[in-house]
Amino acid sequence: MDEDRQARLAKNESLFRELNENIRGLAGRLGGNSPFEFICECSTSGCFERLSLTLGEYEQVRQDGTHFLLAEGHEDIEIEQVVGRHGRYVVAAKDGVAGLVASDDDPRA
Ligand SMILES: [Zn+2]
């Protein structure tokens, strides 16, 4: 796959990561340990699969700027590899160009 496409796919995922960061901010203000609905951060445009995670689970995903939260089976093996399976959701890491774009766009960096 060419680098432009890799970068584009990573951008798409970064967009949803930002959205989830907003949800996280809101959830943090509401408090409590109940799960919140985050959005799948896969590279498929138009995917709005909801994933229920507690803030603690979400924070674990966000600890690495190249990690993304995906629904089970939504990973794209061309640009990422699954680093953790948690039943209803998986954590995927970017490599190559996609990883660099993901780190650059890390909202927490
Ligand atoms: Zn998805």
Image (cartoon, grey):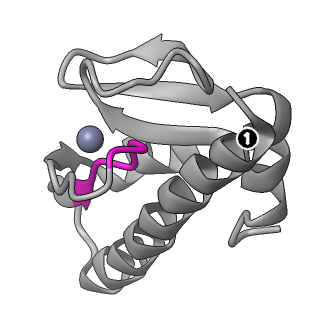
Identify which residue, 71 or 54, lies in the foreground.
71
Magenta stretch: dominant SS?
loop
Q: Does the magenta run of residues contain 43? A: yes
Is 7 on the left-hand or right-hand side of 50?
A: right
Residue drawn at point x = 22 percent, y = 15 percent? 87
- Ligand 1 is found in which quarter of the picture? top left
Q: Mark 1 points at which residue?
A: 98
Q: Name which residue type carries label 1.
A: Ala
Q: Return the x and y of residue 7 as percentages of the image width and height.
A: 70, 50
Q: Return the x and y of residue 79 as percentages of the image width and height.
A: 62, 27
Identify which residue, 11 or 63, lies in the foreground.
11
Considering the numbered disc 1 on the image, is that residue within a helix, a strand or a loop?
Answer: helix
Stretch in magenta: 38-44
Q: Return the x and y of residue 37 as percentages of the image width and height.
A: 17, 59
The quarter of the rendered structure image containing the C terminus is bottom right
Q: In this view, does 62 lie above or below 108?
A: above
Q: Does the magenta run of residues contain 21? A: no
Residue drawn at point x = 49 percent, y = 69 percent? 15
